[in-house]
Amino acid sequence: AGDFRFDEAILMPPHQAADMVWHAGLIGQDAAGKPTGWADIHPHLFHANTDDRVYFVGDLMGMISDQFGHYPKSGHVANYIGRIVAKYIAQRVAGQEVTPLLPDNLCYMMVNTEPQEEISVKFTYELDASGKVIQTQTDMDVRTADLVPEDFAWARSKFSDFLGI
């Protein structure tokens, strides 16, 4: 690919599900039968397609929808789906039917520090009439200081949720 000049960079190795998922035989396959590298997951119940007692949360999650592919590999989504899965397990233990829930995703990006300005992108998900997960994306592309307090409030709420602080 050649040399690339950069002032700052994020270098990421190839991304896929952890070895545990491979060893358990829970990796999805594409139409040709080739492993996808991601967990073979029910798109809105978040359990393995081959075993409804095994739930997936986080970056290992495979294809959700042919409209958008995978959920973003973000802590926000993993935390949200973790909470959904906890509700699903509680419903099953109580002998109730599982009520499908879907996450959302929100990403704030500080694009200037002096003065502080941000943009954001929000994703919402819903099931269409056929049961397919559909994504709607809302971009806030105009740099604004108005998003800064929202971002810090969001971060505080996530830290509180993740870490109990």
Image (spheres, rainbow, N blue to C red):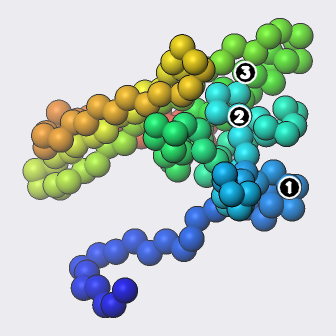
Decide which of tag 2 and tag 3 comes sooner along the chain: 2
Residue in the foreground of this view, choosing between 122 and 127: 127
Q: Residues within 10 Å of mark 3 (few under 14, many from 20)?
A: some
Please give the residue where the numbered disc 2 appears in the rendered image. Answer: 42
Q: Disc 1 designates what residue? A: 25
Which residue: 58% across, 18% down?
130
Q: Residue furthest top?
A: 96
Q: Residue at x 28, y 85 (%)?
A: 4
SS of the residue at dot 1?
loop
At mark 2, the secondary structure is: loop
Residue type at numbered disc 2: His
- Numbered circle sitting on residue 87: 3
Instruction: Identify the residue at image location x=83%, y=9%.
Output: 96
Q: Amino acid at mark 3?
A: Lys
Q: Is residue 4 above or below residue 150?
A: below
Total labels drawn: 3
Give the CA distance from mark 2 to mark 1.
15 Å
**Mark 1 or mark 3, whichever is nearer to me:** 1
Spot occupied by residue 9 in the image (x, y as percentages of width and height): 34, 74
- Depth check, mark 2 against mark 3: the one in front is 2
| Residue 4 visible in the shown view | yes
Residue 155 or 144: which is nearer the viewer?
A: 144
Helix, strand or loop status at disc 3: helix
- Work out which quarter of the rendered image holds the C terminus and state it: top right
Q: In percent of the image, x 81 and y 24: which residue is there?
A: 89
Left or right, 25 with respect to 65, comes to right
* Above or below, 46 relative to 71: above
* Residue 55 pos. (x, y %): 78, 38
Give me the disc on residue 93: none
What amino acid is labelled 1 in the image?
Gly
- Let me know if residue 159 appears in the view: no
